[in-house]
Image: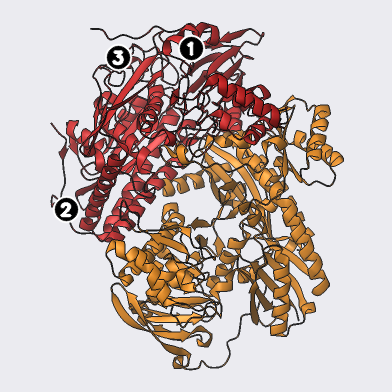
Chain colours: A orange, B red
């Protein structure tokens, strides 16, 4: 027997999913997270899942983990004290932060600038200079550098970053400084920009490398601990892999060296889980939305893989690291509704009641009306639903809170609640449009997938707004991230910045660089135990018109590239530019980055066998409850999802309840259960046709 | 005569009631559409000015030309009144002439594109955007000649014309225009990017009208205008007193030896109406520092400045324009007579915000900030590189945000929202220079309980022979402090020749010959301080010293005695503060301008190394 274990550590709960590789049988568990040291929660969860499933821990030989440890270090500003080495004259590169002030006209009046992650007093300047062409203009003055590094060490820095001007073109001074630092402070981890992110733009490169240093000690500590504990308890040859922001798995030690690549590990797990269920249901183009307590994350899946971007953003920290293109909008279950005195408009969010005090209906001290309260007032979240198994929902408290917006607007409670939900939906809709319509995709070509605790509550409504069908609610939408962790595959990539016009490049040079990069990633995967023959290699180029800021990434086909040369890249770029922006230019193309990506094969996991005949749908009915929809009351049938079976057809109005999530199906819409357990919501007339 | 609107469907829109939730949804969607215009522009534009610095401004107007979302106010209505031709589906209008669009754009480098959006044969919206082109021809690279005596010297003038007609680009006209500029590929791509952004907005408008119904959508836009009217009426009642209050500020000179020019404004309220009267403002300059100030744009600045305090989520628009009246004397530096030169209006455009701050702040001084970084100083460098290729660099400088009620002003930041510096590595990769220094200037922020932000020093090592131009201000008058805060340090420019010879450059100069190896030191100014510096937490002063933002000597302006690591000597600090407080006496003035104009001018040569300019006079 061999088992794989997916573990997702969230803010409130740690979710676990155990899959039997041979039979496809799955077991889930949910335990409270332990924020002070999240490995405790993970180990508790492993105890629990083995106990409840009867699986021998020694049979678990693969652990895949999505972690928010790096993200939390940033959000709570509890990372390492980082020392920074810059080129002389650039000490304040982070302090000035490209002079950017957010907001509109007069925005500076209320601009609250966050402290930098490497303090100015911990920043030293090196006497050295590399030119834009990579040539050494001024050699490195090692003597003064040594003195300054010693002072930094004495001041008590915990991690060191080196980011020199033009190091993307030549990293030799950075390498030398790192070597000297290792002599002077051998115990302190050093990150250098020419390795972490060899890309032009000094501010972004410095910030990215500093973030890497900032989270590195914490992440290493956590991963080392966890790996040690897992080795004690699980199979002797257990492997621990970490899900990166780009949705690829990485061996634990590699992940610990560049933790800046883990910032979106959590959301990437959800998207990977959605890919797992949607792809097996036959949907390869999907828009996903994950509705949590304070925000909603959306992403776009095409050809069974998530769209990526080259930037990762956490709070107000933006770094150059590839991540699943997850956009976040400040609308979730806890988002607070209010009516400003002056305009009498109805606003929802971005302030959130969060987990504490939470929505009014949770009776934990919250008194302000939230989106969750609106869902309660509308009956979408019935009082019979026990959240997480034991939390009671208080409709009276939700109504009392909702009155705070209903009265000033002169609306009934239900009308106001429907307004709150519509506006929250609209925010989510805006985010979904941003990743689809605004990127040149037609949402009607996509299915929607809603998950997270509150996603299935808003799923039907977003399907209507997007006109994207079916709306897929996967099994166990509340632990989908753990599914994603367990079912995704190992991946690594290597890239190089060129920033050269096509006229200065030859196809031989380009191919040569790509082959070199391929060698790097192949070695990396081999190191992680994946045979070269089993690896899939993809080549990519980032291209723009010379002078643009834009980068469009395209996959390169090795054979076509050999036949047609750089012209192929140029033509493909023009076509995509035309599609996105309605124009192409007769300008020189610029090759900015080349990249090679290596992927391991998809895990071979057997399908769950539902077996036997379905019990009648009637057996899944657990009651009836009133809902309010578009200004009228309806009686909705309540179903228990655990008793739904492939082939079952449900007619709206209906509510499907499971341990950690609730799905609403509106009048005029219906849902059916597909072969892998997905709930597919569609307009009733569509369903009848099938 | 007004423009003739040609529609195939002349059925008027029906006003209907829109429920508040739908209204809020449309409001949100309009804000998204505007953000999307920015996104499309920044991704596809090519000149660093637009691409990296974000020097472009989008708007969406309703079918009457009233701006529903945007920043710089309506000009469509004015355009519709003065344009002589037809407005038809498939048209795209282009202009850059301030005198032909009533100052909607205020100098020739700003190209304004206006696109009427039709749905089922009816005009339903306008999308418009203007962006700063790096060059529009004229006498100097960058098209911002300080010494121009008329607009004819400042580049190609484009009257409002149809650059697209019936969806077809007028290539001949575009070719003619691009033939007159120095970097045609940048203009072409920036122009395309602006049109693409407007078309994107157009598609979003059509989507929304389709989704909600034309009448509902059009009615909602009108209600959004009404919402601003109601909100601003309340705000005006709150912040504008009926008694008259005045404030004046200056630009230091016009680059032609005259200055400082006074901008004087008086504000009062009559009923619900706020009146801004610029009587007392100095006459137009013979050079190009004039700012053709559009009254509607000024209303917009006023509204944007105040409404954020009350409902930051509101979609700010034109709806309140009838509540504000702006009076600007003809022939003044804010409303010069044609064909006065206008290209270097950036100093006045920025300074207007200090005038507004000082004017509105007098009623509630504690809520006011010091003088800000009210300019976008320019550095331009052009010539032929080692390969004989023409290069032309245009950079905007940043400086100190003033001390604010909220706290210290950030060092080396931007007054304009969304502007960012062009990455130095980008500049070095594409232009023959190295940026050797890029840091804020210690002690340049005005001392105060809340410190003004420091200005920035940028050291440009030039690697090719060529010419540089500098356009800056506040070299003579000070960025004032408030409520006891001291003024910030003024700006300064110096040229250090390869042979070590040093030369102070005027704040405004063009065509300075430079040689390979020369160094230009470009110092911007600091923000004014807020509140009594003796009240500042000594530990905060110590931290600033440790970080190199304030020097040990500079800490004494706060009455703080400390060492080079910022360790404060508490006893010595108390003694020093006591002494200073006694010597100084109580703080009575709200504004600290570092002396009267006469005093400042008398010290000018000695302090700045440059002669004092002559006072401007109105010709009778």
| Whether residue B373 is situated above or below residue B319 in the rendered picture | above
Q: Residue at x 61, y 82 (%)?
A: A608
Residue A197 seen: no
Which residue carries the number 1 mark? B511
B129 displayed left or right of A359: left
Cα distance, mark 3 to mark 2? Answer: 46 Å
Describe the element under mark 1 as helix, strand or loop: strand
| Whether residue A409 is situated above or below residue B372 in the rendered picture | below
Cα distance, mark 2 to mark 1? Answer: 56 Å
Instruction: Identify the subunit bearing mark 2.
Output: B
User: As rendered, which of A78 and A684 lies closer to the eye?
Assistant: A78
Which of pointers 1 and 3 indicates the residue nearer the eye?
Answer: 3
Which residue carries the number 3 mark? B283
Residue B291 seen: yes
Q: Choose the circle earlier in sequence order: 2 or 1.
A: 2
* Quadrant occupied by the C terminus of chain A: bottom left
Q: Same chain for marks 2 and 1?
A: yes
Which residue carries the number 2 mark? B13
Instruction: Identify the subunit bearing mark 3.
Output: B
User: As rendered, which of B136 and B455 lies closer to the eye?
Assistant: B455
Instruction: Identify the subunit bearing mark 1.
Output: B
Number of other residues with Cα within 10 Å of mark 3, as a class: few under 14, some 14 to 19, many 20 or more:
many
**Location of residue A170 by image quarter:** top right
Cα distance, mark 1 to mark 3? Answer: 27 Å
Number of other residues with Cα within 10 Å of mark 1, as a class: few under 14, some 14 to 19, many 20 or more:
some
Q: Residue at x 85, y 39 (%)?
A: A184
């Amino acid at each position: 027997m061999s088992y794989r274990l997916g573990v997702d550590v969230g803010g409130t709960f740690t979710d676990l999913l155990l899959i039997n590789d041979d039979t496809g049988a799955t077991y889930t568990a949910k335990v409270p997270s332990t924020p002070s040291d999240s490995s405790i929660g993970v180990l508790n969860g492993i105890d629990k899942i083995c106990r409840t499933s009867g699986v021998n821990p020694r049979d678990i030989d693969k652990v895949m983990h999505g972690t928010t440890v790096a993200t939390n270090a940033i959000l709570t500003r509890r990372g390492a004290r980082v020392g920074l080495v810059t080129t002389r004259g650039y000490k304040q590169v982070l302090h000035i932060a490209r002079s950017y002030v957010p907001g509109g006209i007069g925005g500076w009046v209320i601009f609250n600038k966050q402290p930098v992650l490497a303090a100015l007093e911990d920043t030293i300047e090196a006497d050295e200079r590399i030119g834009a062409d990579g040539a050494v203009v001024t050699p490195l003055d090692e003597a003064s550098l040594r003195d300054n590094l010693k002072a930094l060490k004495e001041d008590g820095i915990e991690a060191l970053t080196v980011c020199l001007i033009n190091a993307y073109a030549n990293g030799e001074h950075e390498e030398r400084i790192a070597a000297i630092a290792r002599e002077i402070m051998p115990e302190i981890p050093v990150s250098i920009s020419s390795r972490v992110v060899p890309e032009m733009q000094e501010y972004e490169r410095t910030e990215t490398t500093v973030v890497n240093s900032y989270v590195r000690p914490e992440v290493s500590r956590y991963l080392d601990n966890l790996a040690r504990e897992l080795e004690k308890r699980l199979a002797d040859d257990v492997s621990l892999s970490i899900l990166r922001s780009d949705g690829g798995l990485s061996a634990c030690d590699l992940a610990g060296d560049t933790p800046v690549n883990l910032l979106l590990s959590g959301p990437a797990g959800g998207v990977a889980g959605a890919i797992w269920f949607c792809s097996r249901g036959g949907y390869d183009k999907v828009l996903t939305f994950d509705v949590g307590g304070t925000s909603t994350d959306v992403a776009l899946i095409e050809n069974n893989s998530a769209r990526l971007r080259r930037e990762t953003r956490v709070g107000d920290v933006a770094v150059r690291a590839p991540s699943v293109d997850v956009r976040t909008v400040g609308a979730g279950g806890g988002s607070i509704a209010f009516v400003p005195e002056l305009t009498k408009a109805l606003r929802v969010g971005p302030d959130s009641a969060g987990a504490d005090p939470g929505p009014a209906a949770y009776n934990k001290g919250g008194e302000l009306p939230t989106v969750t309260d609106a869902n309660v007032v509308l009956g979408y979240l019935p009082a019979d639903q026990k959240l997480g198994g034991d939390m009671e929902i208080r409709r009276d408290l939700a109504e009392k809170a909702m009155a705070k917006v209903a009265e000033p607007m002169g609306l009934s409670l239900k009308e106001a609640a429907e307004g709150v939900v519509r506006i929250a939906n609209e925010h989510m809709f805006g985010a979904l449009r941003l990743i689809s319509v605004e990127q040149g995709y037609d949402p009607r070509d996509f299915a929607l997938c809603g998950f997270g605790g509150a996603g299935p509550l808003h799923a039907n409504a977003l399907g209507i707004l997007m006109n994207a069908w079916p709306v897929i609610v996967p099994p166990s939408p509340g632990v989908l991230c753990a599914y994603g962790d367990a079912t995704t595959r190992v991946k690594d990539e290597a890239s190089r910045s060129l920033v050269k016009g096509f006229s200065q490049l030859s196809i031989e040079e380009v191919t040569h660089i790509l082959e070199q990069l391929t060698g790097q990633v192949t070695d990396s995967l081999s190191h992680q135990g994946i045979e070269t023959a089993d690896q899939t290699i993809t080549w990519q180029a980032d291209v723009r018109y010379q002078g643009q800021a834009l980068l469009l990434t395209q996959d390169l086909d090795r054979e076509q590239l050999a036949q047609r040369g750089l012209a192929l890249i140029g033509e493909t770029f023009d076509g995509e530019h035309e599609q996105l922006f309605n124009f192409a230019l007769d300008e020189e193309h610029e090759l900015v980055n080349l990249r090679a990506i290596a992927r391991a094969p998809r895990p071979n996991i057997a399908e769950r066998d539902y077996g036997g005949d379905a019990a009648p749908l009637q057996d899944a009915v657990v009651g009836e409850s009133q809902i309010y929809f578009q200004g009228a009351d309806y009686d909705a049938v309540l179903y228990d999802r655990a008793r739904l079976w492939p082939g079952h057809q449900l007619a709206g109005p209906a509510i499907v309840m499971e341990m950690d999530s609730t799905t609403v199906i509106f009048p005029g819409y219906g849902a059916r259960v597909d072969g892998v357990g997905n709930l597919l919501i569609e307009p009733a007339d569509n369903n009848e046709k099938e | 005569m007004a423009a003739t609107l040609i529609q195939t469907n002349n059925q008027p829109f029906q006003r209907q009631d829109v429920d508040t939730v739908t209204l809020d949804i449309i409001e949100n969607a309009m804000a998204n559409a505007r953000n999307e215009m920015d996104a499309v522009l920044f991704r596809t534009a090519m000149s660093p000015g637009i691409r990296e610095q974000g020097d472009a401004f989008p708007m969406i107007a309703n079918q009457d030309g009233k701006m529903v979302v945007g920043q710089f106010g309506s000009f469509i209505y004015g355009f519709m009144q003065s344009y002589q031709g037809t407005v038809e589906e498939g048209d795209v209008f282009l202009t850059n002439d301030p005198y032909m669009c009533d100052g909607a754009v205020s100098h020739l480098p700003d190209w304004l594109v206006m696109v009427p959006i039709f749905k089922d044969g009816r005009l339903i919206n306008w999308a418009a955007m203007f962006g700063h082109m790096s060059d529009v021809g004229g006498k100097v690279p960058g098209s911002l000649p300080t010494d121009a005596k008329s607009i004819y010297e400042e580049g190609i003038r484009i009257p409002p014309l149809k650059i697209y007609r019936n969806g077809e680009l007028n290539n001949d006209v575009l070719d003619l225009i691009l033939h007159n500029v120095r970097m045609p590929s940048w203009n072409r791509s920036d122009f395309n990017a602006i049109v693409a952004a407007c078309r994107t907005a157009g598609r979003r408008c059509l989507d929304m009208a389709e989704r909600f119904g034309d009448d509902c959508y059009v009615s909602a836009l009108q209600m959004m205008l009404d919402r601003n009217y109601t909100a601003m009426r309340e705000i005006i009642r709150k912040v504008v007193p009926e008694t008259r209050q005045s404030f004046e500020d200056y630009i230091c000179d016009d680059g032609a030896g005259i200055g400082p020019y006074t901008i004087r404004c008086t504000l009062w309220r009559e009923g619900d109406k706020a009146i801004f009267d610029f009587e007392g403002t100095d006459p137009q300059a013979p050079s190009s520092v004039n700012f053709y100030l559009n009254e509607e744009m000024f209303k917009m600045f006023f509204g944007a400045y105040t409404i954020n305090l009350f409902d930051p989520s509101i979609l700010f628009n034109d709806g309140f324009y009838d509540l504000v009246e702006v009076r600007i004397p003809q022939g003044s530096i804010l409303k010069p007579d044609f064909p006065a030169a206008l290209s270097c209006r950036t100093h006045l455009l920025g300074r207007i915000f200090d005038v507004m701050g000082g004017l509105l702040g007098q009623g509630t001084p504690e809520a006011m900030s010091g003088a800000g970084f009210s300019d976008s100083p320019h550095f331009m460098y052009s010539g032929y590189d080692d390969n004989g290729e023409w290069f032309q660099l245009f950079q905007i400088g940043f400086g100190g945000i003033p001390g604010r009620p909220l706290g210290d002003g950030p060092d080396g930041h931007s007054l304009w929202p969304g502007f960012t510096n062009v990455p130095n590595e980008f500049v070095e990769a594409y232009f023959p220079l190295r940026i050797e220094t890029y840091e804020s200037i210690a002690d340049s922020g005005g001392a105060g309980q809340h410190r003004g932000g420091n200005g920035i020093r940028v050291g440009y090592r030039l690697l090719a022979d060529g010419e540089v131009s500098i356009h800056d201000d506040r070299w003579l008058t000070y960025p004032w402090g408030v409520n006891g805060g001291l003024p910030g340090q003024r700006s300064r420019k110096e040229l250090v020749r390869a042979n070590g010879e040093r030369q102070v450059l005027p704040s405004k100069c063009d065509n300075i010959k430079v040689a390979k190896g020369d160094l230009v030191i470009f110092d911007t100014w600091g923000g004014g301080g807020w509140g009594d510096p003796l009240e500042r937490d000594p530990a905060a002063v110590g931290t600033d010293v440790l970080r190199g933002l304030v020097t040990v000597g500079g800490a004494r302006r706060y009455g703080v005695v400390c060492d080079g690591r910022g360790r404060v000597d508490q006893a010595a600090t108390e003694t020093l503060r006591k002494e200073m407080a006694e010597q100084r006496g109580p703080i009575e003035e709200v504004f600290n301008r570092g002396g009267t104009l006469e005093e400042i001018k008398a010290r000018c040569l000695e302090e700045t190394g440059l002669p004092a300019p002559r006072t401007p006079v109105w010709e009778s």
